[in-house]
Image (spheres, grey):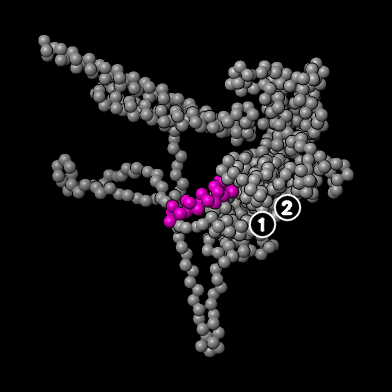
Amino acid sequence: MLVAERAARQRAEAAAAQAQAEAANAVADRSSNEALIAHLKLEIEKLRRQLYGQRSERKERLLDQLELQLEEAEASATEDELAAEEAAKKTQTVRSFTRRRMVRQPFPEDIERERVVIAAPTSCPCCGSAKLSKLGEDVTKTLEIVPRRWKLIETVREKFSCRACQTITQPPAPFHATPRGFIGPRLLATILFDKFGQHIPLNRQSERFRCEGIDLSLSTLADQVGVGVFAGLPLYHLIEAHVLAAERLHGDDTTVPILAKGKTVTGHIWGYVRDDRPFAGPAPPAAVYYASRDRRGEHPVRHLASFTGILQADAYSGFNGLYEVARKPAPITPALCWAHARRQFFELADIAKNARRGRSATAISPIALAAVQRIDALFDIERTINGLSADERRRIRQEKSAPLVAELEAWLHDQRSRLSRSAPVIKPIDYMLKRWSQFSRFIDDGRICLTNNAAERALRGLALGRKAWLFAGSDRGADRAAVMFTLIMTAKLNDVDPQAWLADVFTRIASLPQSRLHELLPWEWKKRALQAAAA
């Protein structure tokens, strides 16, 4: 009787273990699928951003949310997989679930590699024979990190004295990236890129260096930043001239707190971007930045004093002086941003955001929703012509976009006549109708883009960096930031690693004559690097 009960209990425990293992496998399978779905959603959204540009007004912080969902899904899937392995160990009939992971990207070819060979047995563990023959090998790759390596370069210059004439001969001193300095070009590029490209303040860099055994005080780093920015000024002026020679510019600005007499004032960084790629222009893209203590209209008037092309910007009144007919040498042609106008309608038609407001939510405006849908139809056409020539873009726009723009104008006038003055949607309607000629100019000029997103993207890093470095230390500090932002953003626009490029610039710029400085511009530097790699 006891034997039968014991056998029954064992069968029940085995069945329970099997059921538990199968359930754990099912949970792990579901978690794995959820992680895969989250990963694919994130990749799809990234591809959409690359193809169609930023659409933050459509899905606020969508990428951040998707990345957080992927992080949680991956962690949960790993935990469930390990739980399934533990449950499978208790049964002999259920195999543990194995996750289907995404294909890992290959490691760089130039990465440092260390080969560790585990000693092979000298005799057969089965029969003890020493007659072993190698069949092959299995290689397990493990990615590891080595703390940053510091190197002190000692350059020796020997002195010689001539026994015939007593003349002392010695080779010239080596070039330093900073006059009378001791910072190498790669280290100087790292300091500048971390400060202006990664938004890591100098005090945090100094603490990091100290943890690595190198004492570089804040004052020392600040001194090197000043010299490094000064060394990069010639390239800044070359990039500035290249940008202002464009047929069309994107312009925008963002706030930058500037320290002044114990408090901060709201300064501004102005960015102007030359990007002819949407209409297949041959000129390389570039961006130039300026700093100012306020947002008075005199600043863009001074920045664009020599520019006479098309300016894509918002409806900021400070730009109006640039559009005057009597302006010398010629008036600038304005082209307004449809994304900016659409955003005002979208805020009145954002169903998801309105739902989060709960009881304080206002009614969704059907007119604003219809306006968004009509404007989106224009964006759909623009996506199909991005990268075509200016003439081809103009032909397609006049064929497909012009009727939609005419219908939209008539519809806005009709809706405007039916609304009361207190209707919230009146403001975005008037914003467009009062400036309709500047909004519709894109139909007759294939060089004009529908949005000013190029300038907004160029300033996005600054807006994010403000949270890290809090404020610029002075007006001069804001000017230095504008110089470095110009160099770094222009390198990024040309798909050049800013840190590697700056290191090479600091190595070579002092030895190049003025007539050859253009060789260090990011697009020229990239071209020569590709030619050298091909050779």
The correct choice, above or below, for 86 with respect to 207 in the image is above
Describe residue 252's horizontal placement relative to residue 305 as left or right. left
Describe residue 190's horizontal placement relative to residue 125 as left or right. right
Residue 181 falls in image quadrant: bottom right
192, 423: nearer the viewer = 423
Give the residue at mark 2.
241
Task: Give the numbered dot on residue 233.
Answer: 1
Foreground: disc 2 or disc 1: 1
Q: Residue at x 46, y 63 (%)?
A: 152
Q: Amino acid at mark 1?
A: Leu
Q: Position of residue 159 (x, y in %)?
A: 50, 78
Q: Amino acid at mark 2?
A: Ala
Q: Secondary structure at mark 1?
A: helix
Q: What's the magenta region?
A: 195-213
Q: Position of residue 463 (x, y in %)?
A: 62, 40
Q: Secondary structure at mark 2?
A: helix
- Residue 310 appears in the rendering: no
Q: CA distance from mark 2 to mark 1?
A: 12 Å
